[in-house]
Image (cartoon, helix red, strand yellow):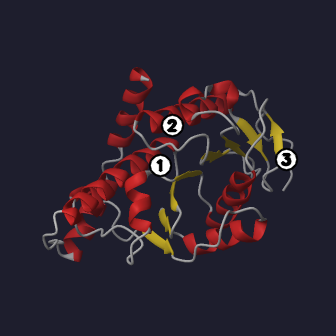
Amino acid sequence: MTASSDALDFDAPEVRQLRADLALALRAAAHHGLAEGVCNHFSVELPDGSGRFLLNPRGLMWSEVQTDDVVLVDAQGRRLAGRHDVEPTAMFIHAAVHRRCRKACVLHTHMPYATALTLTAGRGLDTRLSQNAMRFHGRTAVDAHYNGLALDAAEGERIAAAIGGADVAFLGNHGVIVCGARIAYAYDDLYYLERACQVEVLAASTGRPLAPADAGLAAQVCAQTAAERLQSDLFFEALRRTL
């Protein structure tokens, strides 16, 4: 897809704000222990219908990423603007998820507790357990078929197909992808997903039987959380002040 004549410029104020927000989300993830070396990727699509999206650069720790480090790529994952290279698996995964799943923001991590659950037979979170888990009830998908590094377009397409319309995908033996309409919403979900996975792992480690709630109650809590998205914006602005 090529940019139209009314496509936003890389340095337009609206795009620069998105670049700043994406960089903030990366630094926050590092602060919260969700990063892994210089691997994994966050992206956000430009709101101009061009199919282009912003992506974190290759080779930088998330804790050091600033607004001017963020890179712009096209719908095929080719770099269009920015001073850094981009990592190949980022292009293949994110290009496919943005295009096929129609998600504005796509966050991929190997954060420890969520990834730990992808190694289990269930492959993911029991969304009937903690209150934090219930916010994801009916919003998750599982890709149980690990197929190695995503080093070609076909693997990116396969992962995107497995995600479908879900907001959260547990990638078996790999990690997670969290999607959202806005960076603040996606980051809030990413943070609370890891917290939910953490307490499930801790509860399971006691060896005592787990006590999930009724599925209907879990669905109710999910709807309640979705109606309180102001909390997501407030959390993100608090991160902006403190980081």
Q: Residues within 10 Å of mark 2 (few under 14, many from 20)?
A: many
Q: Which residue is mark 2?
A: 25
Question: Residue 186 bears which disc, if any?
Answer: 1
Label 1, label 2: how many angstroms apart (C-alpha)? 9 Å
Query: Callout 1, which amino acid?
Result: Ala
Query: Callout 2, which amino acid?
Result: Ala
x and y percent of residue 87 in the render? 73, 47
Q: Is residue 48 left or right of residue 145?
A: right
Query: Callout 3, which amino acid?
Result: Ser
Where on the picture, by quarter, is residue 46? top right
Q: Is residue 15 left or right of residue 222?
A: right
x and y percent of residue 98 in the render? 66, 58
Placement of the C terminus among the 4 image quadrants: top left
Residue found 30% across the figure and 48% down from its top: 228
Q: Residues within 10 Å of mark 1 (few under 14, many from 20)?
A: many
Give the vertical position of 62 relative to 112 (above or below): above
Residue found 26% across the figure and 61% down from its top: 200
For the residues bearing labels 1 and 2, Cβ distance under 8 angstroms: yes
Earlier-in-chain disc, 2 versus 3? 3
Q: Which residue is mark 3?
A: 4
Q: Nearer the viewer, residue 125 or 13?
A: 125
Earlier-in-chain disc, 1 versus 2? 2
Label 1, label 3: how many angstroms apart (C-alpha)? 27 Å
Q: Is residue 99 left or right of residue 187?
A: right
Where on the picture, by quarter, is residue 206? bottom left
Looking at the rendered structure, the secondary structure element under dot 3 is: loop
Residue 32 makes an appearance in the image = yes
Earlier-in-chain disc, 1 versus 3? 3
x and y percent of residue 213 in the render? 17, 71
